[in-house]
Image (tube, rainbow, N blue to C red):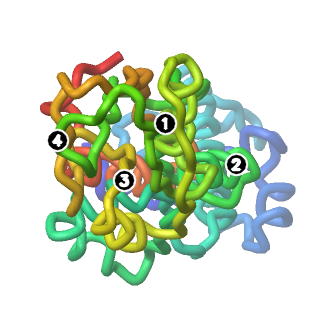
Amino acid sequence: MHLEQISFRYLVTLCVLHETGSMRKTADVLGRTQPAISLQIKALENIVGFDIVEHVRGHFAFTRQGMQLARQAKYMVADMNQMIQEVASETEDNIRLGITEDFFRRGMKDIATLLDAEWIDVCVECSEDLLTKFRNGKLDIVIAKAFSPVQGSTKSWRHQPAWAGQTGPIRGDRGLDLVLLSQGCLYHQAALRACSTSDRSYSIRSVCSSWDTVFRSLVRGGLTVVSRDWPGEAPLCDEDIGLPKLPEATVNLLVNHFSGTRRRDECEQLAASIVGKLGLPEGQRLI
């Protein structure tokens, strides 16, 4: 038996014949002549090597093997129809990736070529805004930070924020001078949580819209909170200079699980590539 000889048209004809029970009705449904239908069934019999129908007194009936083949053909045709509908329903819209600025800059060299692809739109914002956009269906992949694993995350990693800026000792009677990223940033929230549970007084000198602005402001002194793995241009503070303990956080990967197989696979492959290039699985313990 040579399966490559089986035309999909033969299987459709077989399914319709099984439904109608009539060569004439099958010909009407498929827009063909009765002799053409008989020839297709005969050709299929020659390929599979057994009789599909038998003719008795001018009528036909399915053989036992023919009946089994017709039932299986129905499953194959139904699966093909479903696959075509899924592919047809998939949009050609770009995959929308959301990532925080520090992770984007941390992995920029490694993922730049990947993100230059025309089918990827990149959104660089604070974690809080990224998570909101993902929940509202405006992003397909998000890498964002939170204080606990985000519900629905594909993966979450432990993440430890760190103080950066001033490296020398800070007098106990002196308040902390904070330079922070926008309020939706987890590091902004981590700094305020740490200070609120400490006896040290503090003031927010400036709230910045980008890390570059934060780093420029720190030239005049002050403290900020960064990722221990990517402090950027700010030197990490020594742990023994009496700064409030920062809360632990998590890095979370969220992926939109499209109903269409192709889009879902593209999203999952892109997410895996970015996570691998950022070094998350190797560098931090999976929760």
The residue where tag 3 is placed is 222
Q: CA distance from mark 4 to mark 1?
A: 19 Å
Judged by depth in the image, the label closer to the viewer, 4 or 1, is: 4
Q: Residue at x 43, y 27 (%)?
A: 249
Q: Which mark is residue 132?
A: 2
The residue where tag 4 is placed is 168
The residue where tag 1 is placed is 191
Mark 2–mark 3 contact, CB under 8 Å? no
Visible in this render: residue 12? Answer: no
- Image quarter for residue 38? bottom right
Q: What amino acid does circle 4 point to?
A: Gly
Mark 2 and mark 3 lie on one chain; the one further toward the N terminus is: 2
Determine whether, in the image, residue 159 is placed left or right of residue 65. left
Q: CA distance from mark 1 to mark 3?
A: 13 Å
Q: What amino acid does circle 3 point to?
A: Gly
Q: Position of residue 50 (x, y in %)?
A: 41, 34
Judged by depth in the image, the label closer to the viewer, 2 or 3, is: 3
Visible in this render: residue 68? Answer: yes
Q: CA distance from mark 2 to mark 3?
A: 31 Å
- Image quarter for residue 20? top right
